[in-house]
Image: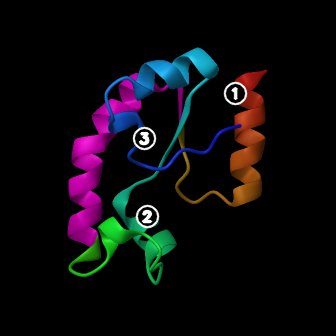
Amino acid sequence: IIATGGGLPMKEGNAELLKELGTVIYLKAETDTLMKRLSGDNARPLLKNGDLREKIETMLAIRGPVYETTADLVLQTDNMSFYEIICQIEKLLK
C-alpha cells in the first residue's frame, strides 16, 4: 500500500507509474467530509490561510477528474470510519 500526497497523480507521468506499481484506489470524499477531516490541520501548505471550503472545492474540481481516470477503483468514503474503509478496500481487492 502506498499512500500518495494529493498532488502526486497531477504531475506528468506519475499516474502511469502508479498504475505500473499495482491497483490504484481513489478514496473519494465530498467537500463537507473533507472539511471535517481537515479543519484544524495546519500541516498542509495548500490549505493554509483563506477559505478552507473554497480551497477544497477548487482542488476537487481540478484534481478529481485526474484521480478518477488514474484509479482502477473508486471508494466513496463519506461517513465511513478508518476501519470501515479498510474493510471495503479488502472487499474490493478480493
- Crowd tier of the residue under label 1, counting other residues whose Cα lies within 10 Å: few below 14, some 14–19, many 20 or above: few
- Number of numbered discs visible in the structure rendering: 3
Label 1 and label 2: CA atoms lie apart by 23 Å
The type of residue carrying mark 1 is: Leu
The part of the image, by quadrant, that contains residue 73 is top right
The residue that mark 1 highlights is 92
Q: Which mark is residue 8?
A: 3
Label 2 and label 3: CA atoms lie apart by 18 Å
The type of residue carrying mark 2 is: Leu
The residue segment tinted magenta is: 53-74
The type of residue carrying mark 3 is: Leu
Residue 72 in view in this figure: no
- In reply to whether residue 72 is colored magenta, the answer given is yes
Q: Which mark is residue 75?
A: none
| Local secondary structure at mark 1 | helix
> 42 above or below 44?
below
Whole-percent x, y for residue 83 in the image? 77, 55
